[in-house]
Amino acid sequence: MEEGTVNEVKPDSPVGGILGIKSTSSDEVYRYVHLDRDSVRPFKVGDFVPKGSVVGLIGPTFPGSSGPHGHFERYLNGKIDWKIHEHLKTAIKAPKP
Protein backbone atom coordinates (compact mmCIF):
# COMPACT_ATOMS: atom_id res chain seq x y z
CA MET A 1 0.00 0.00 0.00
CA GLU A 2 1.12 3.53 -0.71
CA GLU A 3 0.82 6.31 1.82
CA GLY A 4 -2.63 7.77 1.99
CA THR A 5 -5.49 9.27 3.91
CA VAL A 6 -8.20 7.34 5.71
CA ASN A 7 -11.49 7.78 3.84
CA GLU A 8 -13.61 5.09 5.54
CA VAL A 9 -13.72 3.70 9.08
CA LYS A 10 -16.37 1.18 10.12
CA PRO A 11 -15.35 -0.69 13.26
CA ASP A 12 -18.82 -2.07 13.92
CA SER A 13 -19.89 -3.37 10.52
CA PRO A 14 -21.58 -6.79 10.39
CA VAL A 15 -18.44 -8.25 8.76
CA GLY A 16 -15.90 -6.90 11.26
CA GLY A 17 -13.81 -3.76 11.04
CA ILE A 18 -13.46 -1.97 7.71
CA LEU A 19 -10.77 0.58 6.83
CA GLY A 20 -10.43 2.46 3.55
CA ILE A 21 -7.32 4.42 2.57
CA LYS A 22 -7.10 6.81 -0.40
CA SER A 23 -3.62 7.03 -1.95
CA THR A 24 -2.06 10.50 -1.85
CA SER A 25 -0.30 9.99 -5.20
CA SER A 26 -2.97 8.34 -7.37
CA ASP A 27 -6.67 7.60 -7.75
CA GLU A 28 -6.30 4.30 -5.90
CA VAL A 29 -8.30 3.40 -2.81
CA TYR A 30 -7.35 0.40 -0.68
CA ARG A 31 -10.07 -1.19 1.42
CA TYR A 32 -9.42 -3.71 4.19
CA VAL A 33 -12.32 -5.81 5.52
CA HIS A 34 -12.77 -8.39 8.32
CA LEU A 35 -10.35 -6.58 10.62
CA ASP A 36 -10.37 -6.75 14.39
CA ARG A 37 -12.84 -4.06 15.47
CA ASP A 38 -10.59 -2.64 18.19
CA SER A 39 -7.64 -2.30 15.80
CA VAL A 40 -9.76 -0.07 13.52
CA ARG A 41 -11.27 2.18 16.23
CA PRO A 42 -8.23 4.52 16.64
CA PHE A 43 -8.45 5.62 12.98
CA LYS A 44 -10.46 8.67 11.98
CA VAL A 45 -11.42 9.85 8.47
CA GLY A 46 -8.69 12.22 7.34
CA ASP A 47 -5.85 10.54 9.27
CA PHE A 48 -2.59 10.25 7.33
CA VAL A 49 -1.25 6.67 7.01
CA PRO A 50 2.44 6.33 6.04
CA LYS A 51 3.54 3.60 3.62
CA GLY A 52 4.22 0.31 5.43
CA SER A 53 1.95 1.07 8.41
CA VAL A 54 -0.01 -1.63 10.18
CA VAL A 55 -3.61 -0.75 9.35
CA GLY A 56 -5.36 -3.42 11.38
CA LEU A 57 -5.31 -6.93 12.71
CA ILE A 58 -7.23 -9.88 11.33
CA GLY A 59 -10.26 -10.37 13.50
CA PRO A 60 -13.27 -12.57 14.00
CA THR A 61 -15.72 -12.16 11.18
CA PHE A 62 -19.39 -12.94 10.71
CA PRO A 63 -21.26 -16.08 11.80
CA GLY A 64 -20.91 -18.78 9.18
CA SER A 65 -17.45 -17.63 8.10
CA SER A 66 -14.78 -20.28 7.63
CA GLY A 67 -12.66 -18.52 10.26
CA PRO A 68 -10.68 -15.32 10.77
CA HIS A 69 -9.41 -13.96 7.48
CA GLY A 70 -8.70 -10.68 5.73
CA HIS A 71 -10.23 -9.22 2.60
CA PHE A 72 -8.40 -6.69 0.45
CA GLU A 73 -9.91 -4.54 -2.29
CA ARG A 74 -8.20 -2.08 -4.60
CA TYR A 75 -10.23 0.55 -6.40
CA LEU A 76 -8.91 2.57 -9.33
CA ASN A 77 -10.81 5.65 -10.48
CA GLY A 78 -13.76 4.60 -8.31
CA LYS A 79 -14.07 1.09 -9.77
CA ILE A 80 -12.89 -2.16 -8.20
CA ASP A 81 -9.70 -3.46 -9.80
CA TRP A 82 -10.52 -7.06 -10.67
CA LYS A 83 -6.98 -7.70 -11.95
CA ILE A 84 -5.59 -7.55 -8.40
CA HIS A 85 -8.26 -10.00 -7.25
CA GLU A 86 -7.34 -12.48 -10.00
CA HIS A 87 -3.67 -12.13 -9.07
CA LEU A 88 -4.42 -12.77 -5.38
CA LYS A 89 -6.47 -15.88 -6.21
CA THR A 90 -3.51 -17.24 -8.20
CA ALA A 91 -1.08 -16.46 -5.37
CA ILE A 92 -3.29 -18.21 -2.82
CA LYS A 93 -3.48 -21.37 -4.95
CA ALA A 94 0.31 -21.46 -5.53
CA PRO A 95 2.20 -24.39 -3.98
CA LYS A 96 3.49 -23.70 -0.50
CA PRO A 97 7.32 -23.75 -0.09
Image: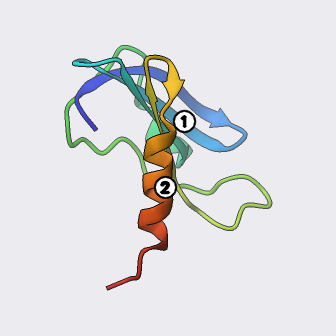
Q: Residue at x 25, y 18 (%)?
A: 24
The alpha-carbon separation of the residues under discs 2 and 1 comes to 11 Å
Question: Residue 62, percent across and down?
Answer: 73, 52
Amino acid on which the number 2 mark rests in the picture: Ile
Question: Residue 83, percent across and down?
Answer: 45, 43
> Which residue, as the protein is rendered here, is positioned at the far bottom?
97
- As helix, strand or loop, the secondary structure at mark 1 comes to strand
> Which residue, as the protein is rendered here, is positioned at the far right?
64
Location of mark 2 (residue)? 58
Horizontally, is 53 left or right of 60 in the view?
left
Question: Residue 15, percent across and down?
Answer: 68, 44
Amino acid on which the number 1 mark rests in the picture: Ile
Q: Residue at x 28, y 24 (%)?
A: 4
Which quarter shows the C terminus? bottom left
Horizontally, is 71 left or right of 45 in the view?
right
Q: Which quadrant of the structure image shows residue 7?
A: top left
Horizontally, is 16 left or right of 53 in the view?
right
Q: Nearer the viewer, residue 10 or 92?
A: 92
Image label count: 2
Location of mark 1 (residue)? 18
Instruction: Say whether disc 2 or disc 1 marks the residue closer to the N-terminus.
Output: 1
- As helix, strand or loop, the secondary structure at mark 2 comes to loop
